[in-house]
Image: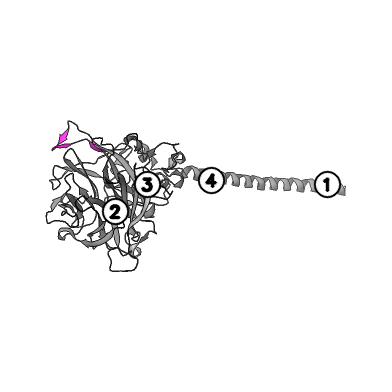
């Protein structure tokens, strides 16, 4: 009897224990399942494919037109914010990671298996396997050595904000130079104009600003002349700087800075015309208008001739080119490191009158076109091989959270003669993005005749 009762008790306890255990196991099981489901959700959502704004990038015209800079609804997240937001899930679309670099030496390492295309936004390596540092740059084709030289801001230093809250910046390190025979493989020629570490009164003192360096060759003096934007960290000096060298690979000797024609000068470029006359083009009056003026014969000064263009239009980052006697200029709006809409302007004479033609970007979708493919122009290079109307539009996809990791966007730009003319300018001069979304492919190698 006692055993029986004990036995029954034992069975009863076992049943209760069993139930409790099953309940606990069930709870643990559902907890684990819930975690898996959540992880799954997180993973799914972290794929750009699930980003709520992705459709704006991939749908052909999927854009609810973005209001211009300064007129945005601060409560509404848009693609520009996503672009600038370092932790955005779309980040990798704009700034593909290191696995997707372009290796010109071994294109097989390229994701697309040996294709010799240049993909805008991917990291571009030099022949030593290091990231090319030539931002806000320009290219000189040196007839004497039959070599291309790419000069630009060498920004391989930490990004920080001037005074803790100013514009994102990198201290002046200098001007980087790379050489190439094919515009594809670039050899690092070093820093050809070096920043100043100690002398606080020097224009190139590291805490100042050196931007958008451009180099031209003076056939009469045999000197390579570099012009650049020189400023202080607060962008109040607003001057141009001039440096010279006997060799395209430097070292360049810094001469002085000046305020051209007595005006403030911020974003700038220089352009050498077919007749050897070179021009300085700069944003002035706090970027309200552009000024253009010829340099003197040795290219070391401006003359007192100056014309104004795009008055009141607030344009910057000028990049000039010439086609069939017409001058063209691509400019950006003024929104710091953030992208905005490019415009192309045309003139029959360098000194104007300049007329605005249109946004030259085509292809991809409206959001890319309105953001210049999330880049800002810096230079236009005639496509090698003398194909009429074919140019390369060089732009910077700035990364204000890490400026050295800003990417290069090179796009084919074609001026097409059409029957549609607007005030004497062809309507169809356009920067042509051949591929959907970011992958504007520029096949450079094809343009070189077989050796
Ligand atoms: C841009 C300009 C760049 C750089 C930047 C600093 O407007 O084009 O060259 O100066 O501002 O915020």
Q: Is residue 429 magenta?
A: yes
Q: Is residue 47 magenta?
A: no
Q: How is the image coloured?
A: one colour
How far separated are the C-alphas under marks 3 and 1?
Answer: 87 Å
Which of the two discs, 2 and 1, sits closer to the camera?
2
Sequence-first disc among 3 and 1: 1
Hey, which residue is sitting farthest top in the picture?
A: 419
Q: Residue at x 63, y 47 (%)?
A: 28
- Look at the numbered disc 4 and give the secondary structure of its residue: helix
Magenta region: 417-436
Tell me residue 280's x, y (percent): 19, 52
How far separated are the C-alphas under marks 2 and 3?
Answer: 18 Å
Q: Nearer the viewer, residue 36 or 121?
A: 121
Q: Which residue is mark 3?
A: 186
**Residue 75 can be seen in this image:** no
How far separated are the C-alphas under marks 3 and 4?
Answer: 44 Å
Determine which of the numbered discs, if any, sits on residue 39 in the image: 4
**Residue 244 can be seen in this image:** yes
Q: Which residue is mark 2?
A: 247
Q: Nearer the viewer, residue 372 or 262?
A: 262
Q: Which residue is mark 1?
A: 7
How far separated are the C-alphas under marks 4 and 2?
Answer: 59 Å
């Amino acid at each position: 009897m006692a055993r029986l009762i004990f036995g029954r008790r034992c069975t009863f306890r076992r049943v209760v224990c069993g139930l409790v255990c099953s309940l606990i196991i069930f709870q643990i099981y559902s907890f684990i399942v819930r975690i898996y489901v959540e992880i799954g959700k997180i993973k799914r959502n972290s794929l750009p494919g699930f980003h709520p704004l992705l459709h704006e990038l991939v749908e052909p015209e999927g854009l609810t037109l973005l209001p211009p800079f300064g007129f945005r609804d601060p409560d509404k997240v848009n693609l520009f914010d996503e672009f600038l937001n370092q932790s955005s899930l779309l980040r990798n679309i704009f700034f593909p990671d290191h696995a997707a670099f372009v290796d010109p030496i071994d294109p097989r390492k390229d994701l697309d298996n040996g294709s010799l295309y240049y993909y805008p936004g991917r990291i571009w390596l030099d022949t030593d396997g290091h990231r090319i540092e030539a931002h806000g740059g320009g290219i000189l084709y040196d007839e004497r050595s039959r070599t291309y030289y790419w000069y630009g801001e060498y920004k391989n230093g930490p990004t920080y904000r001037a005074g803790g809250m100013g514009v994102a910046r990198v201290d002046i390190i200098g001007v980087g130079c790379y050489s190439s025979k094919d515009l594809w493989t670039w050899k690092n020629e070093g820093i050809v104009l070096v920043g100043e570490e100690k002398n606080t009164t020097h224009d190139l003192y590291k805490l100042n600003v050196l931007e958008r360096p451009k180099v031209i060759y003076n056939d009469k003096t045999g000197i390579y002349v570099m012009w650049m934007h020189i400023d202080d960290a607060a962008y109040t000096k607003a001057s141009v700087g001039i440096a010279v060298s006997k060799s395209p690979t430097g070292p360049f000797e810094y001469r002085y800075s000046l305020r051209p024609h007595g005006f403030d000068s911020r974003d700038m470029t220089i352009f050498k015309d077919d007749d050897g006359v070179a021009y300085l083009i700069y944003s002035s009056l706090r970027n309200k208008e552009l000024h253009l003026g010829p340099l003197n014969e040795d290219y070391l000064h401006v003359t007192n001739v100056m014309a104004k263009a795009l008055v009141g239009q607030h344009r910057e980052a000028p990049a000039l080119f010439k086609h069939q006697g017409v001058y063209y200029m691509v400019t950006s709006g003024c929104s710091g490191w953030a992208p905005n809409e490019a415009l192309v302007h045309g003139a029959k004479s360098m000194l104007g009158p300049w007329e605005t033609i249109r946004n030259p970007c085509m292809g991809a979708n409206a959001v890319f076109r309105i953001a210049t493919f999330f880049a800002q122009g810096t230079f236009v290079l005639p496509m090698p091989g003398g194909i009429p109307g074919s140019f390369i539009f060089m732009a910077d996809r700035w990364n204000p959270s890490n400026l050295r990791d800003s990417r290069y966007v090179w796009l084919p730009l074609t001026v097409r003669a059409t029957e549609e003319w607007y005030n004497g300018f062809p309507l169809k001069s356009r920067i042509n993005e051949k591929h959907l979304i970011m992958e504007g492919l520029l096949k450079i190698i094809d343009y070189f005749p077989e050796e």
